[in-house]
Image: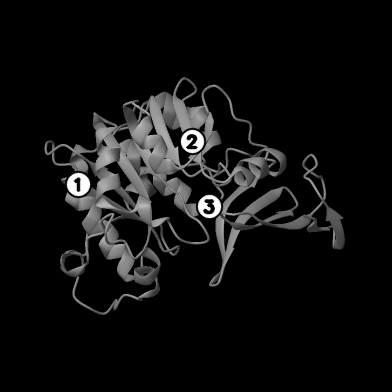
Amino acid sequence: MKILRCVLGLAVASGSLAAAEAGNYVESFDTIYNSLTIERNGSVVELRARSRRGEALESAVDLSDPMKLMVAYTRSLYAGLFFQPKPSRVLMIGLGGAGFHRLFSAAYPDSLLQSVELDPKVLELCETRMAFKPTGKMPVALTDGRMFVKRDKTQWDWIILDAFRGGFVPPHLKTEEFYRECAGRLNDRGVFISNLHSGTELFHSDIKTIRAVFPQVVLFETEGRGNVIACAVKYLTPDMTQPQNWATVEKAVAHVFEGRLDLTALKAERIAIPKKQVERARLLTDDFSPVEFLDAMKTNNTGPK
């Protein structure tokens, strides 16, 4: 099937991807999993997913500074450091444009960052358009995230869930049963990190479902973006809902983050759990996970917290 591309404003036909181009372009691709747009303006490349609701920014990279965290919520994912500051084995479900990966690799060069991506086209675009190179320390498995968790026996320090398809997380990655599978793959002091979207009924069901598995959950809201990062652990003590119990990052790592990741500002993103809304929310299970329906129901933000 021919693919229409727009390169420097000229529409051309292409049957395959070539090496990353130097000029500006907009390209669109339809796969069995996604409808994708990739756009380059100057040194910045954005990967977006198209759906009936419009386009959702999946990831971005500045090719002139690949370690720069271009998408705000990727900074918030590093809240996992407050709970497990030495992540030697990290599983990331959802590759996107690998916007998280390069800074992590620079800060933790000896750590394993295993990504799982369902759509081969996403990996192809990462490599040919966003200058991402999988390595032995940053491998990518092309498979379903839940199947990977079920089959792989590694004990992880972090498990990051950031798998979106056209603006939605696949329902089977939103259930109590899946979260229990993730908990079983975490080290005793590991942390489960999930990218949530606020503003709909799904958000409260997400939190309720995560809390059904993990006894301690802390939320961090990316200011003005609608993203909320949930950090969850499976132990009861110490009380990680108290910031005085959060870990500190080693100086050598903090030096890598300098000018790129403000950990003090990240601590200030912590928000309270909306307990009353969460109590009223529906638990998501393998038998009941109407993700798109709940995501379409707007939350009444004027109600009691």
Query: Could you say where residue 127 lies in the image, as x and y percent from the top left?
Result: 67, 38
| Element assignment for label 2 | strand
* 10 horizontally vs 249: left or right: right
Mark 2 — residue? 115
Query: Could you say where residue 203 lies in the image, as x and y percent from the top left?
Result: 32, 63
Q: Which one is in front, 42 or 132?
A: 132
Mark 1 — residue? 213
Marks 1/2 in contact by CB < 8 Å: the verdict is: no
Quadrant for the N terminus, please.
bottom right
Query: Farthest residue toward the left?
Result: 237
Mark 3 — residue? 71
Residue 241 visible? The answer is no
Q: Residue at x 30, y 46 (%)?
A: 178
Q: Residue at x 32, y 30 (%)?
A: 157
Q: Amino acid at mark 2?
A: Ser
* Comparing labels 3 and 2, the label whose residue is closer to the camera: 2
Q: CA distance from mark 3 to mark 2?
A: 18 Å
Question: Which quadrant of the figure has residue 5?
Answer: bottom right
Q: Amino acid at mark 1?
A: Val
* 194 horizontally vs 141: left or right: left
